[in-house]
Amino acid sequence: MIRTLEASSNDIYEAVVALSRSIAGRSDLESLLSGVGEALRQVVGFDYLGLTLYDPRGNRMLGYYLRESGTPVASLSLPVDQDPAGWVWINQQPIIIPSLATENRWPEFRDHVRAQGVNAITIVPLTAGDDRLGAFGFACLTSCEPSPAELAFLERVASEFALAVESYLARQEAVRERDRLRSLFDITNALVSKLSPEALFSAISEQLSRVIRHDFSLLTLCDDAGGLEMVALHFTGAPLFERDREHIDPEGMPAAEVLATGKPVVVRDVDLGRYPSPQVRRFVDLGCKSACSLPLVTANGALGTLEIGRTRGDAWTDEDVDFLVQVARQIAIALENALSYRQLHDLKERLATEKLYLEDEIRLDHNSGNMVGAGPAFQSVLKKVQIVAPTDATVLILGETGTGKELVARAIHELSNRSHGSFVKVNCAAIPSSLLESELFGHEKGSFTGAVAQKIGRFELADHGTLFLDEIGEMPLELQPKLLRALQDQEFERIGGNRTIRTDVRFVAATNRDLKAMVDENRFRADLYYRLHVFPLNVPPLRERREDIPLLTRYFVQKHAQRLGRKIETIPTHAIEALTNYDWPGNIRELQNVVERSVVLSSGPELHVAMPELSTESSALALHRRGSNAFEAAERARILQALIDARGVVGGSNGAAARLGMKRTTLQSRMRKYNIDRQYQ
C-alpha cells in the first residue's frame, strides 16, 4: 500500500513540521484530510488517504476518503464490526492488509474499496491521549506492505493528526451545545409569548428541528377518562397524516409506559409485539421508524406526553434524550400555566355571564324564594320541599300557570347543599327551538352562522348549582335525547365542539302540562319523563288555598307600595272578601298584577281594588243580598247549626264542611261573609 520514497531524515522531519502547519486552522474534516495529504506527499506515496471516526449515536464507523490528487471520495458508514477501522479502534493496534483479494473478514468494506481499484490498505489508531477517536489509513492500487519503520512513521503522523481532529470535534461539540442552549433560550421565549397552543407548539418544533432531527411531533394531555387528548401536531416536512382523532387511548403505546414510570422511552425499530396499540401500527404503516416519548411532569403531577417521531432509523443518543427532557420540563411548566390561565379565563367568562344573568333576573323583579302562605295546602308543599331539598334528587314541579313553581324551585335550591352555587333558569317555551340547544349547551366559535365567539351554555353555568328547566313540556322532541344524556351522565358537548364537558348539576323541572298524556300521545319521550319524574311535587292553584289570599294581598301591597313610593295603610274588608271569593284563573301571578295595578291607581292611604271582574261580581252580590235577605239568614243559621253540631270544627270527616256538603275553603269563605269566623277561631 505504501511505497517508500527516497527521503532523508531531514525530509521526514520537515514533512512532520509541514503537517503541523498544514492542519493548523482547518475547520472541517475534508480540509483537515487535504492538509495531511499535502504534507505527506513529500515523503509518502499513496493512492488514497482515509479518516474514519467512531459515531456513538449509531455505533458505526464513518469514513472520509481523499484521492492522492486531492479529490474527495464519497464517505462510507458501516457498523463497527463490519469495518476494519472498527477493529483498529477497538483493539488500538494497526492493521496491514497487503492484498484484499484474500481478505474475507469484512466483505462489505472489501467490495466497496475494491470497486475503487484499491488492493492494499494500512490502518493505524487515531487516538489523542485516552480519547479514542477512530482510525487513520492509506490505500494503494497495488499490493504492498510497509516496513516497521514506515509503520512507526504513520503512527506518529496519526498522533499529530489526532490532536487536530480532537480539536475539530471539540469545536463541533461546542457549536452543538451552543445551538442547543440557543434553542432552549428560543423555546423559552416562545413559551412566555402569548401564542395559541398550535402556534406555540409549531415554534417549539421548529426550534427542536435545528438540533434534533425529527419528522413530526405530538403534544398530548391527559383527560379525565384516562386517555390522551391530542392538542397540537407539527411536521417539519410534508404532512404524514391528518389530525383526525382528538382522543388517543395510551394502552399498548410507549406513552402508557412513560406515564406509568415518569421516564422517557426510546423506541428503535418499532416493536409491534411490545406495543400492540392500533395507533402504533398506524404510525409504523405511515413510515415511522423510531420515536422518543417523554413525560410532561410538574410538581402537581403528569400533564401528558411529548412525542417525537422519525421516518428514518437514526439512533437517539443519550445527549438527544437529555436535551429533550429539558425541553419537556419547560413545555410542562408552560402548559400548566396555560391551563391555569385558561381556567381563570373560563372562570372570568363564567362569572361575567353569571353577572349578566343575575342582573337580568334582578331586572325581572323575581321574589327570591320568599313564599307566603299559612294554609294546609301551602304547608303541605313546604313540607315536601324541606324533605327533598337536602337531597340531589331530580324534582318535577307540577301545577297551573302562575302558581309559583319557580319560587318552589328557588326554595329547593336555597335549602339544599348547593345554595352556594348558582340557580340558573331556562324557560324552554320562551326560547326558539333553533336556539334552545345553544342556550342549554353553548357553542364554539364558528360552529354556525352568527357564532362569532364561544358561548357558555346554561348547563355549564349551573355547575355545582341548580338548573331549573321551566316549561319542560315545551322542549322540542329532537332535543330531548341530548337533554336525557345530560341528565343521566352529567356530560355534554358544545355545538361545534368535540370536547366532552362534565358538570355536577342538580335538576329541577316544572310544567303546567300533563306530561304523562303527552308521553301517551308520543309528544314527549317516555325515558325523559321517567328520568324527570323522580320526585313529583304538585303546587295547588290559588282557588284551592283561598285562606292565603289575604296574606298574599298584604304582602304584594307592601312590596309594590314601597317600590312605587305610595303609602297604603288600610285594605277594606269588602276588598279582601272580593279578592278571596274570586277564582283567579291566573293564580298568584294574576293576583300580584291586580294588586300592583290597584296600588298604582290608589291615591290615598286606602287600597282601591282596580279589577272590573271583582266590581261586577260585588255588584251582583249586593243586588242578591237586597233581594234575598231571607235566603242569607237561612244559610247563616244552617252554617251556625253545623258548627254547633261539629263543636266548632270546620274541616275533617266530622267537621262542619262535611256536614254541609261543601269544601272546607268554601265554608270558610261563607263564614267570613257572614262574620261567623270570629265566633269560631
Image: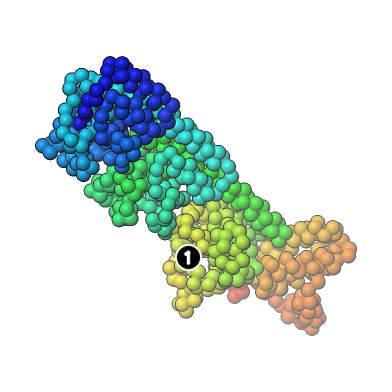
Circle 1 sits in a helix, a strand or a loop, which is it?
helix
Label 1 crowd bin: few (<14), some (14–19), many (20+), radius 10 Å: some
Answer with the quarter of the image where residue 459 lies: bottom right
Q: Residue furthest front?
A: 6
Q: Residue furthest right?
A: 604
Q: Is residue 271 visible?
A: yes
Quadrant for the N terminus in the image = top left
Most foreground residue, 358 or 277: 277
Residue 182 picture location, percent across and down: 50, 34
Rendered view: 151 above or below 340: above
Q: Is residue 625 visible?
A: no
Q: Residue at x 34, y 26 (%)?
A: 39
Q: Residue furthest left?
A: 102
Q: Residue at x 59, y 45 (%)?
A: 194
Q: Amino acid at mark 1?
A: Lys
Answer with the quarter of the image where residue 446 lies: bottom right
Most foreground residue, 163 or 37: 37
Most foreground residue, 30 or 241: 30
Answer with the quarter of the image where residue 602 lies: bottom right
Q: Residue at x 41, y 58 (%)?
A: 242
Quadrant for the C terminus in the image = bottom right
Rendered view: 58 above or below 407: above
Most foreground residue, 610 or 290: 290
Which residue is under mark 1? 482
Residue 270 picture location, percent across and down: 28, 47
Q: Residue at x 46, y 56 (%)?
A: 500
Task: Give the side of residue 576 with respect to residue 304, left or right.
Answer: right
